[in-house]
Image (tube, helix red, strand yellow):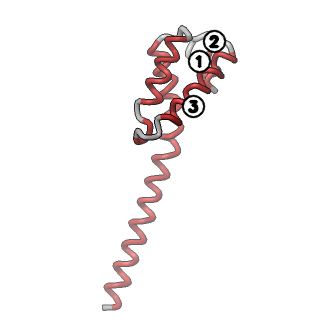
């Protein structure tokens, strides 16, 4: 995924270099578990590693945002559905307690 994303962003990098970047970023993300949502950890890791591998910082940051997109596309609708469900459960509980009084 990293290799393909970089190719589409116009960066020529070997598959093994992309795999190395991805592996180190995963390690850094694991070490950054204390930061809520690892906000900034992933972005900083991609920019720092991008500079080491000769990738411009704006491209490395774009790659990080592409990776975050997955979290946003899956996470936000799931949270909204959960809140919708909880709201309806609360309303149902209030109706039950009101009608029994």
Which secondary structure lies at badge 3? Answer: helix
Which secondary structure lies at badge 1? Answer: helix
Is tag 3's residue or tag 2's residue first in the polypeptide sequence? Answer: 2
The image quadrant of residue 41 is: top left
- Confirm or deny contact between disc 3 and disc 2 (CB under 8 A): no
- Percent across and percent down for residue 5 are 59, 22
- Front: mark 3 or 1: 3
> Whole-Å distance between the Cαs marked 3 and 1?
17 Å
Q: Residue at x 52, y 11 (%)?
A: 52
- What residue is shown with label 1? 6
- What residue is shown with label 2? 13
Which secondary structure lies at badge 2? Answer: loop
Question: What is the quadrant of the C terminus in the image?
Answer: bottom left
- What residue is shown with label 3? 26
- Confirm or deny contact between disc 2 and disc 1 (CB under 8 A): yes
Q: How busy is the neighbourhood of tag 3: few (under 14 within 10 Å), some, or many (20 plus)?
A: some
- Percent across and percent down for residue 92 are 40, 76
> Whole-Å distance between the Cαs marked 3 and 2?
19 Å
């Amino acid at each position: 995924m990293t290799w393909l994303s970089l190719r589409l962003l116009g960066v020529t990098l070997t598959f093994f270099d992309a795999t190395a970047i991805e592996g180190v970023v995963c390690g850094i993300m694991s070490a950054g578990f204390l930061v809520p949502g690892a906000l900034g950890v992933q972005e900083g890791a991609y920019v720092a590693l991008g500079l080491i591998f000769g990738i411009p910082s704006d491209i490395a940051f774009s790659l990080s945002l592409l990776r975050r997109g997955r979290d946003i596309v899956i996470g936000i609708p799931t949270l909204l559905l959960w809140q919708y469900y909880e709201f309806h459960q609360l309303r149902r509980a209030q109706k039950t307690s009101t009608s029994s009084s």
